[in-house]
Amino acid sequence: MYELAITGGQPLQGTVRISGAKNAVLPVICAALLAKTPSVIEDVPDLADVRTICTLIEHLGAQADFCEGRLRIVPPRKLQTEAPYQWVRCMRASFLVLGPMLAREGKAKLSLPGGCAIGSRPIDLHLKGFHMLGADINYGYGTVEAKARKLAGNSIHLDFPSVGATENILMAAVLAKGNTTIENAAEEPEIVDLANYLNSMGACVRGAGTKVIRIQGVPELNGTTHRIIPDRIEAGTFLVAAACTGGEVLVSNVIAEHLKPVIAKLGESGVPVLEEKDGLRVYPTRLLKGVDVKTMPYPGFPTDMQPQLMAMLCTASGNSIITETVFENRFQHVSQFEKMGARIKLSGRSAIIEGDRPLHGALVKASDLRAGAALVLAGLAAQGETRVGRLNHIDRGYEHLEDKLKSLGARITRKIAAGEMPHHIIHPGIYIGQDRLKDQPEEGNYK
């Protein structure tokens, strides 16, 4: 129903504050179900995905009160053991309730999760981990059911350092009897944030952020207060936005260590990024240079920054090659860039970008969350007006994106899409006034 209308060619200037990390807050919200007492989560971004996961845990019996970046979660005495399909289907992170449900109640049943169609993201590593902890798994017909009298610690080796599997197994293991070791674990900062939250509740987790995580099970956990880390992908998006437009922007509330691969690639492209007391400052460059990029699990270049960097490289001098190793279907934005004048050749999991081609405004549509952000960046750098549709994807992961860009001088407006009727369309879980939607309507029929 809505689209962003962007008039490009305006260098961004000023300061922008980065919100709490979407990919950190969602597992922390799920982990709050493990405690016996309430938790308070701070610096929570107001995102569609956050609203959805809050509605999901409320259906499981918890109470979630969200106001101005502060989320208070009261876990129930007894969790419901079956998650409603209409909420699980909305996003992949909903699958993270399985670990806490299994740890607390000894059984759990939920449908396979939804999310962005960026490639295969199998749940077999999650289920393998639960099985190694002593759960019986029944998996079929779009549903997963897990049962265990009592989870017991074990040594678990992941075939791939999956972030979701690492988080889910970690949450199940903190209340298991005995010790658990997760080998070849994901090393992302969001894993460290989850472990810090669990430890502050009384868990015993060591090694988060390395390839080997060791967990000593404890009898119970109690709620605590926890502040979410800054969103490194949002921060990277604004760094690239400044570079795309030739602007000078201070990106505040960031952890520079989390952004090393992005800063390094911007430096190779000729974009100066300097760390200051209040954040990272991007300085304008006279000439953007093409670079080669290969996405990898952390601490490599993040796949979630690949589309945004591609938007910048479309106008850089010389050719660039982006190789996507994480998700096999993450080049859906290429066809939209081509509408704007980009010349990109796909070869397997690589995209060859011919630079030195100015972008022109066009009508484009987001295929997923990060592709949507990339199209906004392309619109900021393009000549003329760009209209970006399917904003539901963008609203899942960027808090007040157009408002933040406006504060930097961008000419961007959210409006009713041409030819659409102006009635209220919202994402599942978003508030209308003071009331929360109680039931999720059928997909494509929100009201």
Image (cartoon, helix red, strand yellow):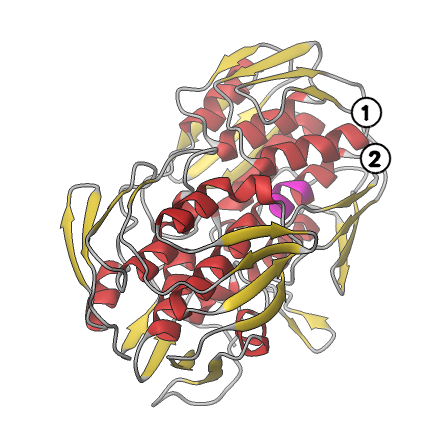
Dot label at residue 220: 1
The answer to whether the residues at label 2 and label 1 have Cβ atoms under 8 Å apart is: yes
Residue 50 image point, x, y percent: 62, 56
**Disc 2 marks which residue?**
36
The residue furthest front is 286
Q: Is residue 428 left or right of residue 113?
A: right
Comes first in the chain, label 2 or label 1: 2
Residue 333 counted in the magenta span = no
Q: Residue at x 62, y 25 (%)?
A: 208
Across and down, in percent, residue 29 comes to: 68, 45
In this rendered view, identify the residue nearer to me: 209 or 138: 209
Asked if residue 18 shows in the view, the reply is: no
In the displayed structure, would residue 96 be above or below residue 208? below
Residue ID at (30%, 36%): 325
Name the residue rendered at 45%, 65% in the picture. Answer: 284
Amino acid marked by disc 1: Glu
Dominant secondary structure of the residues highlighted in magenta in the image: helix
Element type at marker 1? Answer: loop
Q: Which mark is residue 150?
A: none
Is residue 27 highlighted in magenta? yes
Looking at the picture, does residue 136 appear above or below residue 344? above
Percent across and percent down for residue 170 are 62, 26
Q: Is residue 313 above or below residue 131?
A: below
Determine which quarter of the picture holds residue 408: bottom right
Q: Residue at x 35, y 89 (%)?
A: 418
Can I make out residue 14 in this image?
yes
Q: In terms of image quadrants, where is residue 340?
A: bottom left
Classify 10 Å Cα crowding around label 1: few (below 14), some (14-19), many (20 and above).
some
Q: Which residues are magenta?
A: 24-28
Circle 2: element type: loop
Q: Quadrant of residue 204?
A: top right
